[in-house]
Image (cartoon, coloured by chain):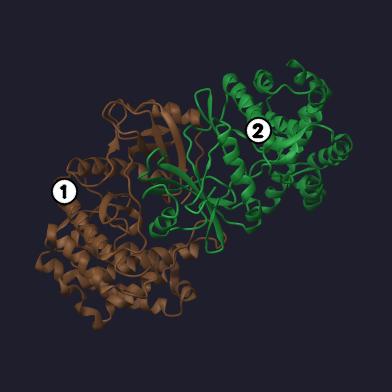
Chain colours: A green, B brown
Amino acid sequence: MAVYTQLGAEALAVLIAEFDVGELRMAKGIAEGVSNSNWLIETSGKDGGGTRFILTMYEYRIELEDLPFFLSLLDHLAAKGCPVPRTIHDRSGALYRKIGDKAVALIEFLPGVSVSSPTVAQTQAVGGALAQMHLAAADFAGTRANGMELTEWQRLAVECGPEGLRAIDPQLADLVARELPLLAIQWPDDLPRGVIHADLFTDNVLMLGAKVTGLIDFYFACTDLIAYDVAVTHAAWCFDNDGRNFALELSAALLAGYEAIRPLSGAEHAALPVLARGAALRFTMSRAYDWLNTPPDALVTRKDPLAFARRLEFYADPANAGIFATT
Amino acid sequence: MAVYTQLGAEALAVLIAEFDVGELRMAKGIAEGVSNSNWLIETSGKDGGGTRFILTMYEYRIELEDLPFFLSLLDHLAAKGCPVPRTIHDRSGALYRKIGDKAVALIEFLPGVSVSSPTVAQTQAVGGALAQMHLAAADFAGTRANGMELTEWQRLAVECGPEGLRAIDPQLADLVARELPLLAIQWPDDLPRGVIHADLFTDNVLMLGAKVTGLIDFYFACTDLIAYDVAVTHAAWCFDNDGRNFALELSAALLAGYEAIRPLSGAEHAALPVLARGAALRFTMSRAYDWLNTPPDALVTRKDPLAFARRLEFYADPANAGIFATT
């Protein structure tokens, strides 16, 4: 959550002139994005087009090869009516441009705010928007491997080490040592695959009331089990922030909203408990790694890995086996 | 440049409802402000009112007692036609509200962008806007002592210590040791006093082309020598960023733009060289202190104190005595 690169008005104006969007009228660096810099841009506009955009500068080279996937996915989904910001192509039709050695892309601005304590109606709407996205992506040609799949959780566990995990919490090393091998055995591989968002937390959804106005931040999007995206969204939306309290009514609303648009198959439904454990472990591991590798005095807020370790314990508890049966 | 406090959409919506500005439609944390958090807010608006605002949360208690000065100054200047954002009062008429122990204020949004390499026309316009502000503030009732005056530069020099200054640059300790006592003797005390901005750098001015659309960030505003504000603005606008190159044409444009609205008195004009040395030393000292007291790995960008030490050397060089004589 930072703006890593300063871009003066002159440099921005030159960049914006490469797009057919009118003249620059405002540019505010916004505190969004973890590995990139973002500006909210306003222009004088052109006939029939918008006047507000998000300009993203990709700060790390590694993302460059994935940019065509991310940016053309936005175009594909927006063209199918999903509430997703479309990519503004430059005058030559390119999806992104370079400033020095960094890539920059201009995408549509969408209204709405991110909720922090979703209601039943909001959670149901998010379920529907996720299903709509899965259906709309079915004929998208691009593919991208999931960089945060099970082998990566294993690698992060090794990087953290049992001592590191125990330093975060005395129980955490045992939890990871128990769940990782179980999930490696139980993980399904015969479920429908497709493009998934893979990170649909509340801050990646814009809403006005109970209407989803934007699904944003597709930079973890990849090709993987579609039902795993439901599990990630479940873990993100159906607990309070620190993972201590599960909300059955939000869980039921998410699944009802999803299945009204895209009913889960029997096999997908049966796999939800293990997929949810995987989703909880995925964020436990990435947060644990970041926790151990972010200086405590850095201005970046470290996210608590235990918030997802608690979700993992919840999903793994046989007493909670019935929660996905409520649909 | 950060957003220190997270404010969820629900908390923001409750806050915005305390103002007569319609319903919340967007909130983006923006990367502006050093000691406070800022959001660009959009609402559904009301008849005759705007729909965009800047919400500022003051993170440090120390500013609270000064808030009425800052916020009513904005109202006063905006009412007189200065390009300054007015304060949006809440439904009870209050200038600011509290969230927990922190104060928050809603101010008008102004369009425009901050230039980084100003043109002659832009610099002349800024001179005019500064003069207009000084005239408009003449009947403002509030007063506030300058917290960054000469005694504070002396205190910062002691805090840094000669070793600290030498660690920044071998020559810096000698420069400060020479200039501080000279300025203490030469500093004028019989010039016109009034409300000054005291920090009118390019990033605190919004422009569209060569038109000033906003003077912002009045959190150093205070009551002091009016001509000192001209000197601060001169030091900020008439050099390249690192202070190595002075631009005589920008200097002439700034003074011409200023004097077209508020001619300097003979005494003010004669004092500009010493006031400019003071302005350069003021930013040298605050930056030197921050340089020595900000961890190198903090995400806050440390501003180079030498960029203003070079300006100080320039202003103190007898060969440059004529630069203020060009008006």
Residue A219 location (% of width, % of height): 63, 45
Q: Residue furthest top?
A: A326
Residue A15 location (% of width, % of height): 44, 56
| Mark 2 crowdedness (10 Å alpha carbons): few <14, some 14-19, many ≥20 | some
To which quarter of the image does residue B91 belong?
top left
Residue B268 location (% of width, % of height): 14, 66
Q: Is residue B278 above or below residue A314?
A: below
Q: Chain under label 2?
A: A
The answer to whether residue A240 of the structure is visible from this angle is: no
Indicate the amino acid at tag 1. Answer: Ala
What secondary structure is marked by label 2? loop
Residue in view at x 49 percent, y 31 percent:
B9
Indicate the amino acid at tag 2. Answer: Asp
Which residue, given by chain and number where applicable, does mark 1 sit on? Answer: B136
Q: Which mark is residue A242?
A: 2
Q: Nearer the viewer, residue B87 or A152?
A: A152
